[in-house]
Image: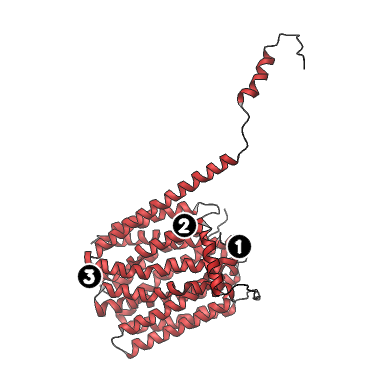
Amino acid sequence: MEISTFSAFKSRNYRLYFTGQSISLIGTWMQKTAVSWVIYSHTHSQFMLGLTLFASLFPSFIFSFLGGVVSDRYDRYKVLLTTQIASMIQALLLTAVIIFQDFAVWEIIALSALLGLINAFDVPARQSLVYEMVEDKKDLPNALALNSSMVNLSRLIGPGIAGLALEQFGEKVCFGLNALSFIAVIGSLMLMKLPIYIAKSRTKNIIGELKEGFVYIRQTPSIAFILVMLALVSLLVLPFSTLIPVYAKDIFKGTASTFGVIDSVIGLGAFVGAIFLASLKAGRNLKMILATNTLIFGLGLVLFSHSTYYPVALVFAAMSGFGMMSQITISNTLIQTTVDPNMRGRVISFYAMAFFGMQPLGGLLIGLLSEQIGTPNTVMIQGIITLFIGALLFRFIYLKKEKLLKAQKEAAPPETPIASTISPLLSLSKTPPGKVINPR
């Protein structure tokens, strides 16, 4: 049996991208972990955790539409290279702030907002360019699943290293290592050999192309439904991760290492889920898998929410990570494999808006709710909402199947009545032997 888990690695450009991005993402998760820990350690406020998430992601919500148009209008390779260099500069500035200021909460939030602005242009270009990196387009779903395994493996490794670094060396080391990690991804991009970019003539301005992308999504119900479901999960559920420092510090009475372990275990569950998706054979019903894993995600959150025994809580955290991964990976795969190539950047910008844009609003909402009813009750409610969204996905799949069967039935030619076929045979069988039937 042919092993297809790593089939996308046949493409040299994708191998380079995967290697460089893997190193860079470990640094990114180290920085994210350090930011959350520093903010909560200085403020002891769940709302400030939500505000930090809001600052880091809301600019992506505002400018991702423009980022998608830029990705479709200009050379995606150059756009991605530019955003990676800009991200490296942001990491260096953040490191400088931490080194030269003892208490820098608002400076960290401002620089997080700058990173969110950069990501508004980075995500559409990066996701769209993956399509061009993969030589055999049949390997595209595998490449997207491997991307998720890369993200979640870095989430497994990064927070764990960050937790140890925070305790042993301080937060400045986490930020400094993240800045250095961008050398790997920038170097990998410069080693790629992509087809020469040929600029296309444009008859519409940026606003016109933006409207064109919106109309395309509205006229493609399958893509529109996926985006709406992802937006709901991002708004109401995914911000649960902002409350992990509360579990580490207040519920489990732990340290920065405890926070890093919980975040890493969530990443472990997500990594296992990503490898599971990468190993799927072509033709599997991804929508059914998405609905099933959404229920697993919800159940994991409900069970994790009120767990007070640390080892058991880690099991439920991993379970949540496994289910959570599908929201990102399968949604992206379904979109990338069905979207018109000319609309790829713009549609992915809507995907980025649904994923990154809703989380900051949800972060503020979840932060406020947690201060009112407590963190465990908030996470439990998020789990119940996830179960409801999973049920909606199953309902959508069922209705679509019913509609397809009805359309096939209406398109089928009318069947010949059985009686008209059998009656001549019966009359022949009743003819006496030797009797000739008059053909007239």
Give the mark nearest the N terminus, 3 or 2. 2
Mark 2 residue element: helix
Check disc 2 and report the residue beneath it.
225
Q: Residue at horizontal 64%, vertical 76%?
A: 199
Give the mark nearest the N terminus, 3 or 1. 1
Mark 1 residue element: helix
Q: Is residue 316 visible?
A: yes
Image coordinates for residue 258, horizontal then vertical, percent: 29, 71
Q: Residues within 10 Å of mark 1 (few under 14, many from 20)?
A: some
Image coordinates for residue 147, horizontal then vertical, percent: 49, 67
Q: Residues within 10 Å of mark 2 (few under 14, many from 20)?
A: some
Q: Residue at horizontal 53%, vertical 77%?
A: 80
- Work out whether 108 lies above or below 343: below
- Work out whether 405 lies above or below 138: above
- Work out whether 405 lies above or below 362: above
Q: Residue at horizontal 50%, vertical 80%?
A: 83
In the rendered structure, which amino acid carries the disc numbered 3? Asp
Check disc 3 and report the residue beneath it.
250
Check disc 1 and report the residue beneath it.
137
**Camera-nearest residue between 28 and 61:** 61
Image coordinates for residue 344, horizontal then vertical, percent: 56, 66
In the rendered structure, which amino acid carries the disc numbered 2? Phe
Give the mark nearest the N terminus, 1 or 2. 1
